[in-house]
Amino acid sequence: MQRSLLIAGAAFAALGLSGRAALADEGLWTFDNFPAAAVKAKYGVTIDKAWLDRVQHATVRLSTGCSASVVSPDGLVLTNHHCILDCAQALSTPEQDYIKSGFIAANRREERLCPGVQAEILTSILDVTDRIGAAVAGKTGPDFVKARDAAIAAIEQEGCAGKTAILRCQVVTLYQGAQYKLYAYRKYADVRLVFAPELATAFFGGDPDNFNFPRYDLECSFVRLYENGQPVKTPDHLRWSAAPPTDGEPAFIAGDPVPTQRADTADQLSFIRSIQLPQTLLRYSELRGRLTRFKEEGPEQARVATDKLFNIENRYKARYDQLLALNEPGFIEAKREADLALKAKVEADLGLKAAVGDPWSEIAQAQNVYAGLYAAYDLLEDAPATGSDLYSWARALVRAAAERQKPNGERLADFTDSRLPLVEKEVVDAKPVDLTLEQLELEFWLTKVREYLTADAPETKLMLGKDSPEELSKRLASSRLIDPAYRKQLWDGGQAAIEACDDPLIRYVFTTDPAARALRRAYEARVAGPVEQAQARLAKARFAIYGTSVAPDATTTPRLSYGKIAGWTAHGQTVPSFTYFKGLYARATGQPPFQLTQRWIDAQPKLNPTTVFDISSSTDLFPGNSGSPLINARGEVIGAVFDGNPYMLGGAFAYDARLIRAVSVSTAAITEALEKVYDDRGLVKELTAR
Amino acid sequence: MQRSLLIAGAAFAALGLSGRAALADEGLWTFDNFPAAAVKAKYGVTIDKAWLDRVQHATVRLSTGCSASVVSPDGLVLTNHHCILDCAQALSTPEQDYIKSGFIAANRREERLCPGVQAEILTSILDVTDRIGAAVAGKTGPDFVKARDAAIAAIEQEGCAGKTAILRCQVVTLYQGAQYKLYAYRKYADVRLVFAPELATAFFGGDPDNFNFPRYDLECSFVRLYENGQPVKTPDHLRWSAAPPTDGEPAFIAGDPVPTQRADTADQLSFIRSIQLPQTLLRYSELRGRLTRFKEEGPEQARVATDKLFNIENRYKARYDQLLALNEPGFIEAKREADLALKAKVEADLGLKAAVGDPWSEIAQAQNVYAGLYAAYDLLEDAPATGSDLYSWARALVRAAAERQKPNGERLADFTDSRLPLVEKEVVDAKPVDLTLEQLELEFWLTKVREYLTADAPETKLMLGKDSPEELSKRLASSRLIDPAYRKQLWDGGQAAIEACDDPLIRYVFTTDPAARALRRAYEARVAGPVEQAQARLAKARFAIYGTSVAPDATTTPRLSYGKIAGWTAHGQTVPSFTYFKGLYARATGQPPFQLTQRWIDAQPKLNPTTVFDISSSTDLFPGNSGSPLINARGEVIGAVFDGNPYMLGGAFAYDARLIRAVSVSTAAITEALEKVYDDRGLVKELTAR
């Protein structure tokens, strides 16, 4: 099937975004506002509080940007392979490449720490909307941002006071600022790898098949939560279903989708289409080219670049599919009509009009400002040096040292007390880095700074001086930050250590950080602040008209969605709900990325060819749901979500139940593969409690 | 200055595209319809027939896609450095790298043949509109395309009958098919390199400064036309001005700009913005990344990849600037208003309405079809294997053999009798290729076929079978086509030789060509045919309303434009018209691409710091004008056009005299550099007739 969303645009338009009323199966719902009545009415199944609580307490957020679920009483957690790819890369050596061979812990002593990874489980939700509202009353622009961030920092600090070793508090902004809730998570900083198949098996079909279906991927892995050196006891786990679901049965997804923009105005989408996505995609594309060539330079280059190339290709394709959606004829126009329809409703209500004003124009104006600011803000402040671990450590060290000197409420949001422990863990955990690869990433980034801002921009002159990106990146990549002990020493040494440090990368970040911070302030004062305030009023209008019958946009926090096991029909072709083991063998060509590992070739006679392998379901989802449990009405895990079909990314802006599908690997396939391909009876026993 | 067209969109909109009446200085005019009266009225200078004839006969089209001018009585031709970059690359060896060192022929015996390069000078223009009109009367779709192409082939054959050794005939479609003219060119197949500076001097500032101004580039080279082993006598050459122009004086550009799309409808521009440019840019970007990394693998890799990387970066930036223009808020909307205004005028005239119909809807419909066809058509038929010389030779050999068996009128347009000699020259001329680089390009292309069409598309299955792009490209790059004698043998052997040939690349192209041809037929039947017919009616409507007071869109054929020496003001900043030698030294950093060669460092004391180096002028232009002479009112050459400012590429869709600027290197700078940096007194003497 050609990757084209032509039909989707028409469908989105036909479905009438104008209402923003809940569409069939739409919604990434919070656990405290799940539409159980709608599910009951549509699917005839009862989702009660016990069901919701159990699923909430078994749903895990990983700091790698993934979701997961607890699937045994001993802290065993199911997630995707690509969610632990960085971990497998970090644990590998030239002699023992777990990405190629897979990782199978023969027993718990062999389970190995994933550096920088933290797991979090949501334990409580508290509404703090009024408190934030009081703190920001009458404030605008940078004052508004400052007051709000200070209030958030204070609430997070109080919420977890005395329990920060095991809890993490996070104030979550819902409905574009119409609601604020304090989420408390039980956190686990010791996450160990238990089982990972070979990348060739987990990601069979590779990039060509990514974001698509049918698929034949054992896209799973298992990790285990530890505390004090022992596996964590997890009575609230999901029961494992070794049997596959049936076509059409209800299917739920719990997890932490990254932010969607379904409530954005047409002007915001135009900005994304015209500025943000083209710039991001073009940069990812070139970096992808550099990494691809690097990978072909030799076997060791191929090994060390695997996760970085995977990450960039995955991000690239996700955003490419979003661009396709926004470029659909009629898509943005339909959003504009929806904006105008809502505006007409507001203007028809004098009280509402007085309270809401004209947020649409304010947002449009801010987009124009953002267009002029975007390249510099993105390259210097928001996403500098894409992929470089050394740079991200240096940035975190320099900023943490400076921010820790300030009162909690006045710090950059990433460095408040509630967030510092994870930042520290990510900086100091041991993780191998390849210096040639780091230099490649730094050089690429510096060439883009010069290209997008021009050689004559003050930012470029600051970042490069009389240097070329090629020479400067070589110096920066000679940083001693490669040594975790040195990073720990700098972290502990604070501002004095940073100021005294002569490491070239630390010095570079220290010198250039004021320019990056200035861009952040400009962005907050001229874009984010005005947009957030306008959006909050817009959200009030939506609230007044639609209430909470519409789910809030996703915010990388725990959500629950519902739908059913279903394929789809597009361009006159119907794609069925399931693939089977036999399809894997039929699709294999003997060449990567369609190459079977020897294990799977050997196991073929033992495997049931009609075992359900991967599953398509209409359950609403978005990236960040990777690793999420696919759950049946009985609350059993029946799969691990790992992808969507080509329409899924358009779900950033609008959901269409006729086209958007979640793609999961079935627990039935995982069970059979563990037994017959990997001979891992211990894991099967733990999962099935047989 | 940030590369942003924000102001341009507003300007284009304000200028009111709606009229399509001639804007100030707008127009890439044909030599037989130059608006001398308008020039007289505006600038007070007289451009008479003698002036026009002389300039026409001194203007050269190079088969490298560039323009040039004859500047001495002995066939000496001025063009850009980047127009002979491929030639310099082809003449270089690991021991003698002319791209690095420059090329200076000490005498005529040292002047060296540029492989595959042909020069053409327009000698006559004949209107053949009625004859084509009679041939296509009553025909539509593929029948229309076939009848028109047959008529064109016949006219071209008759026009040059008996003189094909020295003439080339070309039927040119003007005003979207409202006019057809037969152009006859004197052709020169023996073009030799005379002088080229170092790339570091010609392209000082490199990609970061490309498509911008101020510039400090000696972006020139000289070639000489030969015939029968002797320099061609060229009495109709342009006089060389060793003095620079003055600010504000009139300045003309003659040359062969590639097709513009100023008469396109809003729906065509939407297609370009949403489908064509994003796909093309993303592919160029990734290939750029692969080539960049390849180039860094070693000095010999750096040497052999220089022209390929330059070409891809140049194309990339050109299209990126076009995307910026189309993404300007209001740009396409202004075009749509212009469409509606014209439509209203047509509908107000019953006779016109009957003759014109509704071409806008027909064009819109064809764009929808094109959207579904574009990726396959572009990747397999229109631009396969970007950059690969081996592939382009194989394709030409396979197709030429098949097409030569058919009557002239039934062949693919690229293989009619009037075009075959140049195709043959491009195939059989000796040119070195680097097999690793060829493999890289072929592999990249095959991965994109799989990515854009998906692994399951019939086209992908045909192109890859069970192979991976990595393995298949290795086999294809083992082709014997690297040997020019072998290519000559296959060319001469025709269809029998191709069918008997066991070369892997010839076999591959032979096997996959039917699929590529099928895509071409589908494109012609469903997109090009309907669009061309609708455009011809649209052009009739424009003709009826505006006449020839508007210039036709450019078509890579000789054009003449006028304007004046001028800088511009945007974003509150004024950019002056000239740069000077002293600016080069001020901008040098010691690091590429801002690094001076030793020659220029040594010459600094001898050079006049206030010599005009590069020039900005408001003269209308478009890519393909690279190498064009910049001409003063006296008909003297005062510069060689080599670029435009960042707004120039928006000129694809609309011209704005307030913003769009041509960038040229001055003949004053060339003269002084030849004397004082390169010590090439012979060339100076020939140019200045001193």
Image: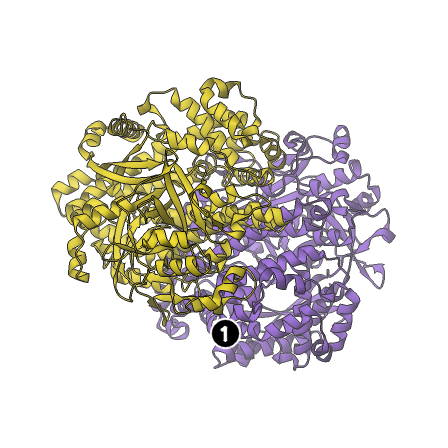
Chain colours: A purple, B yellow
Q: Amino acid at mark 1?
A: Ala
| SS for dot 1 | helix
Q: Reply above or below: A329 against B201.
A: above
Query: Closer to the camera, A665 or B42?
Result: B42
Query: Closer to the camera, A80 or B177?
Result: B177
Quarter of the figure that contains the C terminus of chain B = bottom left
Query: Closer to the camera, B184 or B16?
Result: B184
Q: Reply above or below: B461 against B44.
A: above
Can residue A265 be seen by looking at this rendering? yes
Query: Residue, x 47% and y 79% (percent of image)?
Result: A140
Query: Residue, x 53% and y 58% (percent of image)?
Result: A260
Q: In x, y percent, where is residue A413?
A: 61, 73
Q: Residues within 10 Å of mark 1 (few under 14, many from 20)?
A: some
Image quarter of residue A396: bottom right
Q: Chain of mark 1?
A: A
Q: In x, y percent, where is residue A392?
A: 66, 65
Residue at the extreme front: B690
Can residue A328 be seen by looking at this rendering? no
Direction from residue B110 to residue A108 in the image, left or right:
right
Query: Residue, x 58% and y 33% (percent of image)?
Result: B477
Return the residue at label 1. Answer: A522
Q: Reply above or below: B356 against A331.
A: above
Direction from residue B256 to residue A273 in the image, left or right:
right
Quarter of the figure that contains the N terminus of chain B = bottom left
Q: Reply above or below: B225 against A603.
A: below
Q: In x, y percent, where is residue B613?
A: 39, 63
Query: Closer to the camera, B378 or B678?
Result: B678
Q: In x, y percent, where is residue A222?
A: 75, 50
